[in-house]
Amino acid sequence: MKKHTLHTPHSLLRLTAALTLAATMAGCAPLLVGGAVIGSGLFVTDRRTTGIQFEDQAIELKAASRIRDLATLGNVSAVSYNRVLLLTGEVPSQADKTRVAEAVARVENVRNVVNELAVLGNSSAGSRSNDALLGTKVKATLIDAKDLQANAYKVVAERGTIYLMGRVSEREATRGAEVARSVSGVQKVVRVFEILSDAELAALGRSAPPAPISTTPAAAPAPAPAPAGMSR
């Protein structure tokens, strides 16, 4: 597959724009332990209600507090979108992985926990820095895709894997994953989406852009089972 790399001056400008957008979207930045999150926080065209956006930020803060209370843990990120909490990072054992999921599931307003924690040693500072850059490249590439609304996606990067969160149509889910996979350095894309119908998007007053005349979805690894109501 042809890989998209950011080497040209125009692409560097787009990368700068993505960094600026990420900073604008951060608002009250979520409290995380490890990992890299691009495009979190409040945004004027977010497909969540303002109330849900604030709930998501509260969920992230409370989840991070509970994670810190489990003193044996390694690098763990907790990112909430529409009250679905994504866990990424590393923990020392399978028992720790289960303990974290159980602890954050008890946080008020959490609808679902998607547990993507790996039983591994802690990732290095260099690896986390690479993830941050990779996530920014993915966000910049989503901005470049004229048939997508980049702000509809939350991008989480962990050890070369890109997790895409958001409330999107089936076409946006497929196309967004295809765009993310095109970025050089992305090893895998995991979709953690809530799929909306065109009618539901129209009811939000934020209809998706029309589909392009021709797109060819990239082949994806066989996804793991997703929680009810979610698409991966």
Image (cartoon, rainbow, N blue to C red):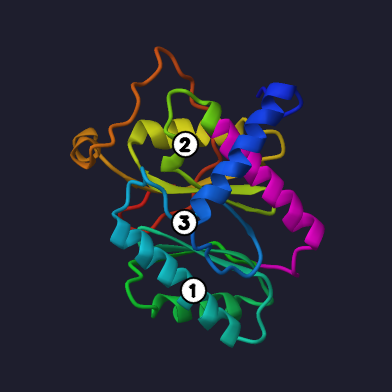
Q: What residue is at 49 percent from the left and 20 percent from the top?
A: 216
State whether residue 150 is above or below residue 165. above
Q: What residue is at 71 percent from the left and 68 percent from the top?
A: 120
Q: Is residue 222 left or right of residue 138?
A: left
State whether residue 184 is above or below residue 156. above
The amino acid sitting under disc 1 is Leu
- 3D distance between C-alphas at marks 2 and 3: 14 Å
Would you say residue 129 sits in the magenta stretch? Answer: yes
Residue 117 image-quadrant placement? bottom right
In the image, which disc is placed on residue 41? Answer: 3
The residue wearing badge 1 is: 61
Q: In this rendering, which labeled residue sits more in front, label 2 or label 3?
A: 3
Earlier sequence position, callout 1 versus callout 2 = 1
Q: Which of 56 and 219 is in front in this view?
A: 56
The amino acid sitting under disc 3 is Gly
The residue wearing badge 2 is: 150
The amino acid sitting under disc 2 is Ala
- 3D distance between C-alphas at marks 3 and 1: 12 Å
Q: What residue is at 59 percent from the left and 43 percent from the top?
A: 20
Q: Which of 85 and 137 is in front in this view?
A: 137
> Within 10 Å of the Cα at label 3, are there few (<14), some (14-19), or many (20+) other Cα atoms?
many
